[in-house]
Image (cartoon, helix red, strand yellow):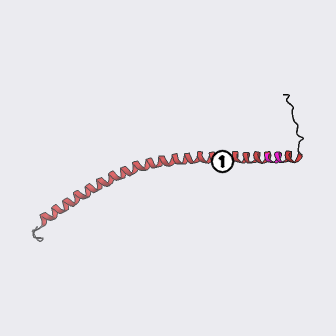
């Protein structure tokens, strides 16, 4: 069998359509690349902000722990002071307020 190349004459309308489709594809590809670059840039900025927030939350955890310790210390002091007041009031019961 002999191979013969069959040539189809070029259709100017089809060639124009192919060129238009190619231009549209290239335009969309260019826009997609730009938009992807913007999204990538925004994602990088977001990662930095999340990192900063994570660091701040870590610092807040330490500050909250310190504050909780201070509150426990104040609660203990209040309890001791209240116990002393009750003890002093108990000692005063039955005493003559006019006696020195």
Q: Which residues are magenta?
A: 17-21
Q: Is residue 91 above or below residue 98?
A: above
Q: Is residue 25 left or right of residue 8?
A: left
Q: Is residue 42 left or right of residue 93?
A: right
> Which quarter of the figure has residue 11?
top right
Q: Quadrant of the C terminus?
A: bottom left
Q: Is residue 17 left or right of residue 45?
A: right
Q: Is residue 18 magenta?
A: yes
Nearer to us in this view, 10 or 74: 10
Nearer to us in this view, 88 or 70: 70
Q: Residue drawn at (62%, 45%), measured in percent from left and top?
A: 40
- Residue 98 position within the rendered picture, expressed as x and y whole percent measured from the top left: 11, 71
Q: Is residue 22 above or below residue 92?
A: above
Crowd band around label 1 with a 10 angstrom C-alpha radius: few (<14), some (14–19), many (20+) = few
Q: Residue drawn at (59%, 47%), measured in percent from left and top?
A: 43
Q: Residue drawn at (33%, 52%), measured in percent from left and top?
A: 70
- Residue 93 position within the rendered picture, expressed as x and y whole percent measured from the top left: 12, 67
Q: Is residue 59 above or below residue 89?
A: above
> Farthest residue in the front direction?
1
SS of the residue under disc 1: helix
Q: Quadrant of the N terminus?
A: top right
> Farthest residue in the top direction?
1
> Which quarter of the figure has residue 83?
bottom left
- Residue 8 position within the rendered picture, expressed as x and y whole percent measured from the top left: 88, 40
Q: Residue drawn at (19%, 59%), measured in percent from left and top?
A: 84
Which residue lies under the disc numbered 1? Answer: 38
Q: Is residue 56 magenta?
A: no
Nearer to us in this view, 43 or 59: 43
Q: Is residue 96 left or right of residue 66?
A: left
Secondary structure mostly seen in the magenta stretch: helix
């Amino acid at each position: 069998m002999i191979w013969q190349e069959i040539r189809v004459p070029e259709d100017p309308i089809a060639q124009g359509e192919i060129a238009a489709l190619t231009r549209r594809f290239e335009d969309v590809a260019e826009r997609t690349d730009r938009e992807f670059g913007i999204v990538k840039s925004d994602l990088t900025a977001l990662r930095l902000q999340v990192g900063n927030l994570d660091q701040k939350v870590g610092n807040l955890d330490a500050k909250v722990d310190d504050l909780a310790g201070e509150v426990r210390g104040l609660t203990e002091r209040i309890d001791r002071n209240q116990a002393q007041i009750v003890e002093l009031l108990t000692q005063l019961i039955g005493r003559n307020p006019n006696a020195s």
